[in-house]
Amino acid sequence: MLITGWNRAGWMDQPARSGDRIARLIGAAPGTVVMGDTLSIKVYQALASALELNPSRRVVLSDTGNFPSDLYIAEGLLRSLGEAYALRTVAPEDVAGALDETVAVLMLTEVDYRTGRRHDMAALTALAHDAGALTVWDLAHSAGAVPLDLAGASADFAVGCTYKYLNSGPGGPAFIYVSPTLADQARPALSGWLGHEAPFAFDPDYRPGRGIERMRVGTPPILQLAALEAALDVWDIADIHDVRAKSIELSQAFIAAVEAACPALTLASPRAADQRGSQVSFRHPEGYAIMQALIARGVIGDFRAPDILRFGFTPLYIGLDEVLRAADILAEVMVSDLWNRPEYKARARVT
Ligand SMILES: Cc1ncc(COP(=O)(O)O)c(C=O)c1O
């Protein structure tokens, strides 16, 4: 199968087939999403193509809450384009007011990785378009967590990973969406052979493939795509609106229980459920040690520097009993200072 599987098992088309299944979850038409690489690479591709489609402008606008990799990727890309290009970051609530005639691309992560705060994708995309800018949306913390409507919002580019709420497993492939109105104009910056119009012609000159196909780069990760396919099967029976409703129920219950029992923890997420994704975060100066104490007791969340305890709510496999039990364990950790031990304070490489 090493050689024959590409035809016999249809592996070469797998990035588009899986992309179509993701498309259904993010409000995109079939044929507008393709899988591959990791999210940082997809951010680069989307941003580079968007900038090239808006050649008279030089500014990428983002917010200070964006995931650092997105900002680093933007910085690196802009450096290679020359000194005239700049990345401008503003506070999340100031994005709309910062959209001026210099902005080429508005690049945002829809759900903030630390606080869970959610941008209004449709409203900001409309404002960006009014200001003459294109949009790149990072859906890492949105896809599989909240209902999305990329087509309805007229988003230009979107990217996301599949190893969070889509459960593809560590290092699972990322996705990229390009609006059908732009897909045949967008020029790929990473012009790899599998984005070529005819890869097996082995032509020395690059000609971009049709539509979203041109956003492919190199050999697709077939084993990771197989894991993704299995993970996506659940969406044949689960409705994202039901998942969202349950996620809100779980997260509201968690906030109420934690606030009642743990006054030392400060809610870092928006209180209004419609303004956050499917995560709830609390702040505490000893957040790292508290999270390690929780993990040791089977309540598994993340710590995000400098002081955020992040809890993801995944109704596909977590129910109310577990959420309330997690809140009880957190209360016990806080009330009895169970976190205050040297082994919980020693920082591991991955937090
Ligand atoms: C919002 C966001 N963007 C980008 C990334 C980077 O993704 P990757 O490591 O797959 O390149 C992450 C990773 O968690 C993320 O949360």
Image (cartoon, rainbow, N blue to C red):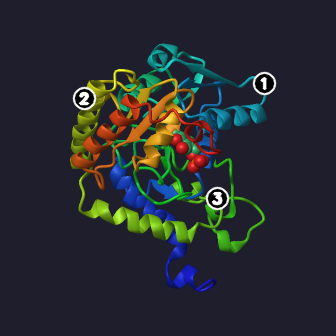
Residue at the spot of label 1 = 83
What amino acid type is highlighted by mark number 2? Ala
Q: Position of residue 129 (x, y in %)?
A: 45, 26
Q: Residues within 10 Å of mark 1 (few under 14, many from 20)?
A: few
Kindly indicate whether the residue at mark 2 contacts the one at mark 1 (C-beta within 8 angstroms): no
Q: Position of residue 153 (x, y in %)?
A: 36, 36
| Gap between marks 3 and 1 measured at Cα | 27 Å
* Residue 179 visible to the viewer: no
Q: In which quarter of the image is the C terminus?
A: top right
Residue placed at 52% from the left, 35% from the top?
289
* Residue 197 image label: none
Q: Position of residue 214 (x, y in %)?
A: 59, 56
Task: Provide the secondary structure element on which disc 1 rests.
Answer: loop
Q: How crowded is mark 3: few (under 14 residues within 10 Å), some or many (20 or more)?
A: many
Residue 318 against residue 59 in the figure, above or below: below
Q: Is residue 65 left or right of residue 72?
A: left
Q: Which of marks 1 and 2 is nearer the N terminus?
A: 1
Task: Provide the secondary structure element on which disc 2 rests.
Answer: helix
Residue 45 against residue 337 in the figure, above or below: below
| Residue closest to the eye, 323 or 198 | 323
Residue at the spot of label 2 = 256
Residue placed at 24% from the left, 50% from the top?
319
Residue at the spot of label 3 = 217
